[in-house]
Amino acid sequence: MKLIKHWSISIFILGWLLIGQTKIWGRNCDISWLHSANVELNKMLLSYSPISALNYADSINKIIKNQNLEDCPDALWILYNRSEVLELHNRFQEALKEYYFLSTQAKLLKDFELMASCHISIARCMETIGRKTDCLRHLQISKNIIESNKLWSLNSFLWVRYSSYHRIYESLDSSFYYANLAAQNSEIYKNIRQAADANMLIGMVTPKKDSAAQYFWKAKNYFISNNNYDGASYMAMSIYNCQQKYHLQQPSGNWLDTMANYLSKIQEYNPSYHMLMSIFYEAKSAIFENNHQSDSAYSNSKLANKYLKLSKTDINHAEISQSEIDFLVSEEKKKADSLLRQSNLQKIAIAILGLCLLIIAGMFYSNHLKRRKIEQQKHFIQNQNHELNRSLERQNMLLSEVHHRVKNNLQLVISLLALHYNKIKNNSEFQFLEEIANKIRSIALIHEHLYNSGEFERIELGSYIKELLEHYLALHTSAHKFEYHLETDAPIYLNLETTMPIGIICTELISNSLKYARREDVTLLLEFKLNAFENKFILKYQDNGVVPSVKSSNKEGMGTMLIESMVRQLQAQSSSSAFGTSSFNLIFQEKKVSIV
C-alpha cells in the first residue's frame, strides 16, 4: 500500500505538469508543487524506502530539467535527497559526484545550509567506505561552515557523524561525548531522525553496558515514528544482544521475534534489508546450535550467508579517489582563480591609485599657483582698499568740514538777523524776523547733527526733533516755559533730503503753538509721536493749547503755505484738526535719491 501511495503521488504530479504548465512557469522558483515534492521525498527517506524514493526522485528530476528549474532551492534539495537515496543503494560513487556538484552550486548561491549538509553527507560516505582522512576533512569543513553562518540546527547532524567517526576510528569516550551533544541538540530542534541515530550511538558506546538497551529502545521508538522498520529491526537485534550478553530483564519481551515482526513490515529489499536478514538468521542459527539442533542451525546459517552475499556491494575506490581529487583540484583551482582575480584587481587598484596620486599632485600644484595668484590679487586689493579708505577719510573730513562751515554760516546769518530784529521796535516785524531765524536754525541743526554724529548721509529723526525742541526751550524765559513729550517706537534713520522738509514742518508747528496756543491755566505741552509702518512713517503732532493756534495758521498765512509746500515736496499726506486742541498728522516715505 505504501508503494502504491508513493507512485500515485508521482503520477498525479507528472500528469498535472503535462497539462500545459511547462510554458507558464518558466524559471519561476516560487512553485508549491516543487516544495511538496521535496517534502514527500524526505518522508520516503525517513521511512527508509530507497527504491520508491529513487524512482520518485528520478521522475521529479526529469521534470525539473525540462522546466529548467535546476537552480531553484527546492530543486537543489531534491537532488541532495536523491544523492542520499543513492547512498542507501550503496551507489557511493554516484552519490559523491552529486554531493560534490551540489556543494559547488551551494557555494555559488551562498546556500550555506545545503553546502554544510553536503559536506556532512560526503563525510558519511567516506566513513562507510573506510576513508578516514577524507571523512575527517569534510567534517571539519562542515563544522567551519556551521560556525561561520550560525547554522545551529545542523549541529545534531554534525555531532552524530563526529560520534560515528570516533566510534570507528578514534576514542569511544569522544564518540559518547558527541552522541550526547547530538541527542541534546536534536531535542532542542525536534529532529527525530538525528535523535534516533544519537540514541543508537549512545547505546553502542556507553560505558554503562547495562543501560545500553534503554538507549536502543528509545532509538527504536524514534525509528518507528518515522515508519523506518529497517532501523527498528536493527535496534530490536541490539536489544536482543544486550539481553543475551548482560542477562537483562528490561526491556522485556522476545526481541528476536520483535525483529522478525519488524522485518516482515519492510516492503523494499535493499542491501540494508539483506544485511538485517543475514544478522537475523545468524542469531537463529546460534540458538539452534545451542539447542543442539544441527540441521536447523545449518539451514539458518546458509540463509545468513545467502543474505550476506546479497548485501555486499563492490566499491570502486579508485573512482572515488579520483572524484575526491577532482573536487579538491576544482576547489584549489577556484582559489587560484580567486587569487588571480584579486591580484589583477590589486594591480588595477595600484594603477588607479597612482593615477589618482598624479591627479592629486597636479591639483595641489594648480592650487599652489592659484593661491599665489590669489595672494597677489589680495595684496593688490588691500592696497586699493587702503587707498580708497584714505580717500574716503579725506572725503569724510572734507564733508564734515563742509557741514561745519554751513552750520557756522547759517549761525552767522541767524546772529545777523538777531542783531537786526533786536533794534526793531515794531512787534510784527520782530516776530517775522524771529520766525525766519528759527527756520534757519532748524536747517543749521541738521548740519550740526551731521557734523557731530560723523554720519553724513542719514539722520536719526527722533534725536533731531528733540534737539529742535531743546533749542526752542532754551530761547524762552521761565515765564514762557513749555513742556514736550517725544514718543518713538524705534530709531528712524532718514536721508538729508527727507529730514530737511520735516525739520521745516516741525519748526513751523512749534512756532505756531508757541505763538498762538498758550493758556494761562496750564503749561503748554507739545507732543510728537513717530511710528514706522512697513515702508512708511507717521508723524503725529499735538498741543494742549487754545483753538486759535490752528485758526491763526490759515491757508493764506505764510506758515500754512510753507507746510503745504514741504508736504508736496515729500509727496506725503497730511491732515490737521482743531477740536479743543490742535493736531497735525503726516504720512510720508523716505525720498529716493539718485546715486551718482
Image (tube, helix red, strand yellow):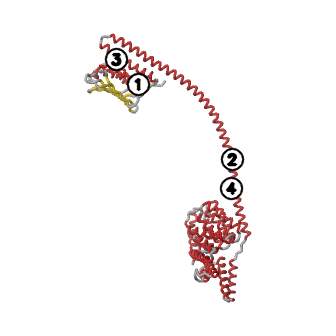
Looking at marks 1 and 4 on the same chain, the residue that comes earlier in the sequence is marked by 4
Name the residue tied to disc 2.
350
The residue lying furthest to the right in this view is 318
Please give the residue where the numbered disc 3 appears in the rendered image: 435
Q: Is residue 61 visible?
A: no
Q: Secondary structure at mark 2?
A: helix
Residue depicted at 56% across the width and 25% down the height: 386
Residue type at numbered disc 2: Ile
Cα distance, mark 4 to mark 3?
Answer: 105 Å
Distance from the alpha carbon under mark 1 to that under mark 2: 73 Å
Instruction: Indicate which label's residue lies in the foreground, 4 or 3.
Output: 3
Q: Quadrant of residue 97?
A: bottom right
Residue 49 placement (x, y as % from top left): 61, 75
Q: Return the residue at label 4.
A: 338
Q: CA distance from mark 3 to mark 2?
A: 93 Å
> Nearer the N terminus, badge 3 or badge 1?
3
